[in-house]
Image (tube, grey):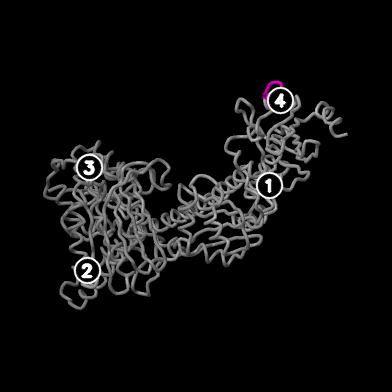
């Protein structure tokens, strides 16, 4: 009966049919099989069935065939996630489904294989799977947009992935800044605390074993490492979360199923990781922007306060100096005045630091070779630090010069080194190193691309927590005890580096130390040549025009100048000053505040007056200076005198200009 029906079945069945003997050789094939595999009439007969599959799978199939023949049964193959591949006579490969059945004949037991090309149906299944995964990514992205914080998404993501992939466990792990602790979010059959402990001690090992640019299937060693937090994980996949080529965490999907993980699942895991990394980067960018805006607002506030405070200090200082003359014969009064003047000087130092933070202090940048500067400064710093602390300096002579104000740089270095000393427990080593770095476009958000000198001051002291580090450069913020610090040291350094078109970066780990890096631009030209002094107007009682919008400050300046024998004219703004100068062409010098009420500032006034009165000298004063290109203007307009100024400083400056 079977023998009679077999030819009819071979002709009727639309699938490719192969009849194989106990030796694994094809003894009969229908036309569909010959067309499917690309053989001519009877071209399949006599071939080993392994010839119809890729060479790399033949030995494995032989072992499976022998096992099947020892215990034959009706068996469908290739209908699940298992992928079977056939190979045509020309080497082309294609996915197949196979149904096996033993057949007893008069010539012994044979085996019937029904083979079906599933290329189209597999493509449809893959398209459906990919569409589902794409929809999952889109849903995740919408959740990220709608979520109040990225933490909401991070908390729900592991459970969502378990539902989508039918996995047994999903984990998101983020190393803390110190690299010794982990923030772990898990779902499924895994112990979060155990995983946190494993990754906290072996994060570097796992990180080094994962590719930097894709999701990958975990090997036996990695599964064994993670298996300590779960039960019987047979397969898994993982990928790193990255931010600017730096790993910020890892996403892991684990399963107890032995079925291999498909490429589409790896693609989904990688897509989710990229999305999560982008969301976290968005949050960090928002935090950095908010921090920069807060510092800018603080800068505007402190800059305004410092300007007004300097005007007050100028009035107080000037009045005290005039009183000092009046009470020259009263020693007790002079002692009181001296104490008050000392407090004025301390107030002026305070406002100077505030102006540095606000980036409104006048700078005189020039081309500075740092080798000699840091070594000379190091000698002085070592004396200040004392024998309990050692200062090591690394700076070779071949570095290019920096474009920076050398005096302000020295002040900044002193502030940072003393901060490092205070962070050490009574003794220790401080390293001051100077190098250079080329910054690529978009490599650092706060820094333009270009060539920079990088000065680093490192200590192994107590370090700072993340919350403290975020506030480290805010004015008046300090972790020191009352009376041991003003909280303005790093604020001044921050403002100085930003005003110098550089950047301040603080890398700190609580309990392990801090490294403060100052990025300063490399000089692009040689130091400017000092010009010879201009011709000055001479006279026994020269006339000086005092322009100041604060009446108290103006009164002090006029008193100083009149006491020295000068004739003074007074104006409260630029318009009045121009009118007065027009009526007094004998004016030898204009002494003006930079910040004047009205549309004209001191620089513009001095330039206009010099056109009106050729040979006029100019002396400017300021509590801070917001005018652009201050240093370039000074060479044209005159000299700058900082408030609060002493009488001697004012008179010396005037004498130098109109002697």
Taking 390 as reference, is 1 above or below it? above
Of labels 4 and 1, the one closer to you:
1
Front-most of 329 and 637? 637
Q: Which residue is mark 2?
A: 384
Q: Quick one: label 3, few (<14), some, or many (20+) residues within 10 Å?
A: few
Which mark is first along the chain, 1 or 2?
Answer: 1
Other-residue count near label 4 (Cα within 10 Å), few / some / many at <14 / 14–19 / ≥20: many
Q: Nearer the viewer, residue 147 or 96?
A: 96
Mark 2 vs mark 4: give the one in front.
4
Q: Are marks 2 and 1 in contact (CB under 8 Å)?
A: no
Q: Are marks 1 and 3 in contact (CB under 8 Å)?
A: no
Disc 1: which residue: 67
In this rendering, position of residue 147 left or right of residue 393: right
Real-space Cα distance between discs 1 and 3? 96 Å
Q: Are marks 4 and 1 in contact (CB under 8 Å)?
A: no
Residue 318 locus on image (x, y percent): 25, 63
Q: Nearer the viewer, mark 2 or mark 3?
A: 2
Q: Main secondary structure of the magenta part?
A: loop
Tell me the number on the disc at residue 34.
Answer: 4
Q: Secondary structure at mark 1?
A: helix
Residue farthest toward the right in the current orientation of the protein: 1
Q: Position of residue 247 (x, y in %)?
A: 48, 52
Q: In the rendered structure, does residue 335 fall within the stretch colored magenta?
A: no
What residue is at 19 percent from the left and 69 percent from the top?
Answer: 326
Name which of mark 2 and mark 3 comes first in the sequence. Answer: 2
Q: Would residue 35 appear left or right of 309 to someone viewing this image?
A: right
Residue 635 disc label: 3
Q: Earlier in the sequence, mark 1 or mark 3?
A: 1
Give the CA distance from mark 2 to mark 3. Answer: 37 Å
């Amino acid at each position: 009966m079977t023998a009679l029906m077999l030819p009819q079945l071979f002709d009727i069945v639309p699938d490719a049919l192969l009849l194989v003997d106990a030796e694994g050789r094809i003894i009969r094939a229908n036309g569909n099989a010959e067309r499917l595999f690309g053989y001519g009439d009877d071209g399949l007969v006599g071939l080993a069935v392994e010839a119809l599959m890729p060479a790399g799978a033949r030995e494995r199939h032989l072992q499976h065939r022998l096992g099947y023949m020892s215990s034959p049964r009706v068996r469908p193959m290739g209908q699940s996630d298992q992928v079977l591949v056939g190979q045509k006579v020309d080497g082309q490969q294609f996915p197949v489904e196979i149904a096996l059945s033993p057949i007893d004949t008069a010539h012994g037991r044979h085996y019937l294989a029904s083979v079906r090309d599933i290329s189209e149906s597999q493509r449809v299944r893959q398209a459906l799977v990919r569409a589902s995964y794409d929809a999952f990514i889109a849903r995740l992205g919408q959740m990220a947009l709608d979520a109040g914080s990225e933490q909401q998404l991070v908390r729900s993501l592991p459970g969502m992935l378990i539902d989508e992939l039918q996995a047994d466990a999903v984990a998101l792990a983020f190393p803390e800044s110190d690299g010794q602790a982990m923030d772990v979010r898990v779902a499924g059959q895994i112990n979060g605390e155990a995983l946190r402990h494993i990754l906290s001690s072996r994060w570097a090992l796992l990180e080094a074993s994962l590719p930097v640019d894709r999701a990958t299937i975990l090997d036996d060693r990695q599964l064994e490492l993670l298996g300590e937090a779960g039960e019987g994980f047979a397969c898994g996949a993982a990928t790193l979360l990255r931010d600017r080529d730096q790993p910020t965490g890892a996403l892991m999907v684990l399963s107890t199923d032995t079925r291999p993980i498909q490429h589409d699942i790896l693609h989904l895991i990688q897509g989710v990781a990229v999305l999560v990394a982008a969301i976290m980067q968005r949050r960090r960018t928002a935090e950095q922007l908010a921090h920069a805006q807060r510092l800018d607002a603080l800068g505007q506030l402190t800059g305004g306060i410092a300007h007004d405070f300097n005007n007050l200090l100028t009035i107080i200082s000037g009045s005290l100096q005039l009183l000092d003359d009046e009470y020259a014969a009263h020693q007790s009064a002079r002692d009181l005045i001296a104490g008050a003047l000392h407090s004025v000087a301390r107030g002026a130092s305070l406002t100077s630091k505030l102006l540095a933070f606000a980036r409104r202090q006048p700078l005189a940048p020039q081309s500075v070779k740092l080798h000699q500067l840091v070594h000379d400064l190091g000698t002085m710093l070592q004396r200040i630090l004392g024998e309990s602390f050692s200062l090591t300096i690394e700076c070779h002579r071949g570095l290019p010069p920096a474009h920076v104000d050398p005096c302000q740089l020295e002040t900044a270095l002193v502030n940072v080194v003393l901060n490092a000393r205070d962070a050490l427990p009574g003794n220790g080593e401080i390293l001051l190193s100077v190098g250079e770095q080329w910054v690529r476009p978009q490599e650092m958000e706060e820094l333009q691309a270009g060539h920079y000198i990088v000065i680093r001051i490192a200590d192994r002291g107590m370090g700072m927590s993340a919350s403290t580090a975020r506030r480290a450069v805010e004015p008046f913020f300090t972790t020191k005890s009352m009376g041991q610090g003003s909280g303005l040291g790093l604020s001044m350094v921050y403002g100085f580096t930003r005003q110098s078109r550089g950047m301040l970066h603080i890398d700190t780990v609580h309990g392990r130390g801090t490294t403060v890096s100052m990025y300063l631009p490399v000089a692009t030209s040689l130091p400017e040549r000092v010009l010879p002094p201009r011709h000055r107007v001479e006279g026994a009682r020269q006339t000086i025009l005092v322009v100041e919008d604060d009446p108290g400050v103006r009164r002090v300046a006029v008193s100083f100048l009149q006491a020295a024998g000068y004739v003074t004219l007074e104006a409260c703004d630029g318009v009045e000053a121009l009118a007065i100068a027009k009526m007094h062409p004998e004016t030898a010098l204009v002494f003006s505040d930079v910040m004047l009420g009205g549309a004209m500032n001191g620089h513009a006034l001095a330039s206009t007056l010099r056109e009106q009165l050729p040979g006029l000298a100019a002396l400017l004063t300021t509590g801070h200076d917001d005018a652009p290109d201050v240093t370039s203007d000074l060479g044209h307009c005159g000299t700058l005198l900082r408030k609060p100024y002493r009488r001697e400083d004012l008179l010396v400056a005037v004498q130098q200009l109109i002697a």
